[in-house]
Image (cartoon, coloured by chain):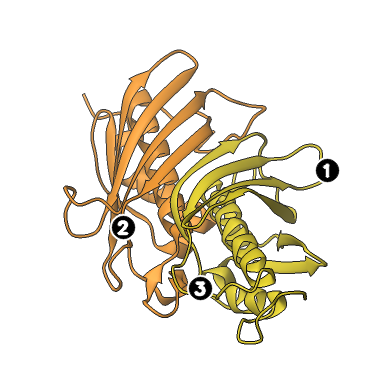
Amino acid sequence: MIGARTSALSPADVLARIADVPYARFLGLRLDLAGDEMTAVLPFHERLIGNPMLPAIHGGVLGAMMEMTALAQLAVSRSAAGEGGGLAKPIDVTVEYLRSGRPVDTFARALIKRMGRRIANVHVEAWQGARGAPIAALHGHFLLPSEG
Amino acid sequence: MSAPITRDPGFLKAMNIGSPQTRELGVETLEVGEDWALLRVPYKPEMIGDPETGVIAGGVVTTLLDHACGQAVMARIGQPTTIATLDLRIDYMRPAEPHQPLYARAHCYKLGRSVAFVRATAYDRSADDPVATAQAAFMLNSSSARPRGVS
């Protein structure tokens, strides 16, 4: 892509590295890149369940998934801009639960509302059946890696 | 008079094991009071979020805090009720120490008719040096939103 430094990893390489993080593998998180748009996919698995009676995916898992989505989107955007790799660190996140997480696949997309020099503000939405009926949302601030 | 069932160690253990996610993580309830709960999660390699440092992912902290907040609400209610997290705000103060268990202490400081409010702290060595703090609101007797807990 234009302006990318040859030393920087490509967005696809960056995502492959994040998907290989042990906790991402534990969740079974997949990161799909279509052009400059990234979608995180959390295939349903029994171990993601928090309440077996309903059953419903654990709220913590949904928060974790959206946090990983934000980190991945930040890494992809920085990579596309020729910035160095490395993961951002969450400073604070607010998770809103809108609907029960049913035992099916979950998707999430992140929107970077502002990318500063040190701090980024990111909004994430997670949905299952319908994009227009999100099951959870996350707003957060992230500390960007200082290298590069 | 015996303590309410939601403060019974056996009940809480069954809840932690009955939930596949907390069973996988190894979440345990160590102590519970009238309006609070103390939980622990061990350090496990599959929780690592930063392979270079071995620090666990923020998501593990999120799940532990969410679970601890829910159990503090249940403790205060005293009987099994369906509750749903409305929102959960987490401030991350510092990385958790690798190879250390992580603790979370949650306090349900207000129980209304429809909503409960909770604060929680996650720490490894000392509660005075938190890894993260959380603030959450729960809807009580929920059936349509995001029910959890034991119904």
Q: The yellow chain is which one?
A: A
| Name of the residue lying farthest toward the top | B113
Q: Do the residues labelled 1 and 2 touch (CB within 8 Å)?
A: no
Residue closest to the eye, A73 or A8: A8
In the rendered image, residue B19, in percent from the top left (x then y), is placed at 51, 52
The C terminus of chain B, quarter of image: top right
The N terminus of chain B, quarter of image: top left
**Which residue does the numbered mark 2 point to in the structure image?**
B94
Q: How far apart are marks 1 and 2 (CA)?
A: 36 Å
Label 3 lies in what chain? A
Residues indicated by labels 2 and 3 sit on the same polypeptide chain: no
Residue A86 marker: 3
In the rendered image, residue A87, in percent from the top left (x then y), is placed at 51, 68
Q: How far apart are marks 1 and 3 (CA)?
A: 33 Å
Residue A19 marker: none
**Which residue does the numbered mark 1 point to in the structure image?**
A130
The hue of chain B in the figure is orange
Q: Distance between the residues labelled 2 and 3?
A: 17 Å
Q: Residues within 10 Å of mark 2 (few under 14, many from 20)?
A: some
Amino acid of disc 1: Ala
Eyeballing the image, is A142 above or below A45?
above
Q: Is residue B120 left or right of residue B51?
A: left
Residue closest to the eye, A65 or A28: A65
Q: SS at mark 1? A: loop
Q: SS at mark 3? A: loop
Amino acid of disc 2: Arg
Q: Are marks 2 and 3 in contact (CB under 8 Å)?
A: no
In the rendered image, residue A130, in percent from the top left (x then y), is placed at 83, 43
Q: Residue at x 27, y 67 (%)?
A: B97
Q: How crowded is mark 1: few (under 14 residues within 10 Å), some or many (20 or more)?
A: few
